[in-house]
């Protein structure tokens, strides 16, 4: 695989610590959900990255399918839970709003994007990801 881009982040203190991009462009305090402490958590950061990546992959898939949506909006919900084996796993819902296409083409576009998006490819087969498509 040809690598187009690579980045690196470092976390100190886990879910109650701090994480930062090694290039200094972004740093965030972290907080356990429900702790009352101000800060983000890894699931929120994953949701933000997945939403941005998926929404960016939509025009790529649209071009491949020769579709021209008027606009898109992607929201991602990320949950975390315990597996029967005692480990932890993510649970994901992708909500994609497509403008300017009928329902069938919008569904086809979102499914094609799910095959193109790097986050979708990274989660496929080991994380439950559900697609929800609406047409505006």
Image (cartoon, helix red, strand yellow):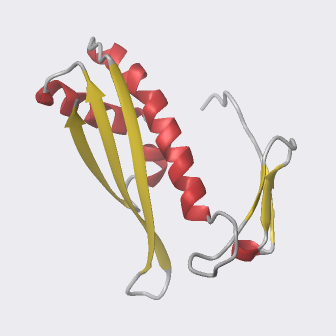
Residue 28 visible in the shown view: yes
Displayed quadrant of residue 109: top left
Using the image, determine if residue 73 lies above or below residue 12.
above
Task: Give the position of the C terminus as an image quadrant.
Answer: top left
Using the image, determine if residue 79 lies above or below residue 124.
below
Indicate the position of residue 83 as horizontal and vertical percent values. Answer: 41, 81
For the residue pair 6 and 101, the one nearer the viewer reads as 101
Q: In percent of the image, x 48 and y 28: which residue is there?
A: 56
Indicate the position of residue 108 as horizontal and vertical percent values. Answer: 20, 30
For the residue pair 92 and 36, the one nearer the viewer reads as 36
Using the image, determine if residue 31 lies above or below residue 93.
below
Indicate the position of residue 66 as horizontal and vertical percent values. Answer: 27, 11
Left or right of 99? Residue 37 is right
Indicate the position of residue 85 as horizontal and vertical percent values. Answer: 42, 87
Q: In percent of the image, x 27 and y 24: which residue is there?
A: 99
Task: Give the position of the N terminus as an image quadrant.
Answer: top right
Left or right of 122? Residue 126 is left
Q: In percent of the image, x 82 and y 40: which residue is there?
A: 25
Using the image, determine if residue 5 lies above or below residue 83.
above
Displayed quadrant of residue 104: top left
For the residue pair 5 and 71, the one nearer the viewer reads as 71
Q: How many marks?
A: 0
Residue 118 visible in the shown view: no
């Amino acid at each position: 695989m040809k690598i187009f881009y690579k980045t690196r982040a470092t976390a100190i203190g886990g879910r109650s610590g701090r994480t930062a991009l090694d290039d200094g462009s972004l740093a965030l305090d972290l907080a356990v959900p429900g702790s009352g402490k101000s800060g983000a958590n890894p699931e929120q950061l994953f949701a933000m990255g997945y939403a941005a990546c998926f929404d960016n992959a939509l025009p790529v898939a649209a071009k491949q399918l020769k579709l021209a949506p008027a606009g898109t909006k992607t929201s991602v919900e990320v949950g975390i839970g315990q597996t029967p084996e005692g480990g932890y796993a993510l649970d994901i819902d992708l909500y994609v709003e497509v403008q300017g296409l009928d329902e069938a083409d919008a569904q086809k576009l979102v499914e094609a994007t799910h095959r193109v998006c790097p986050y979708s490819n990274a989660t496929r087969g080991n994380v439950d990801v559900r697609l929800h498509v609406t047409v505006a």
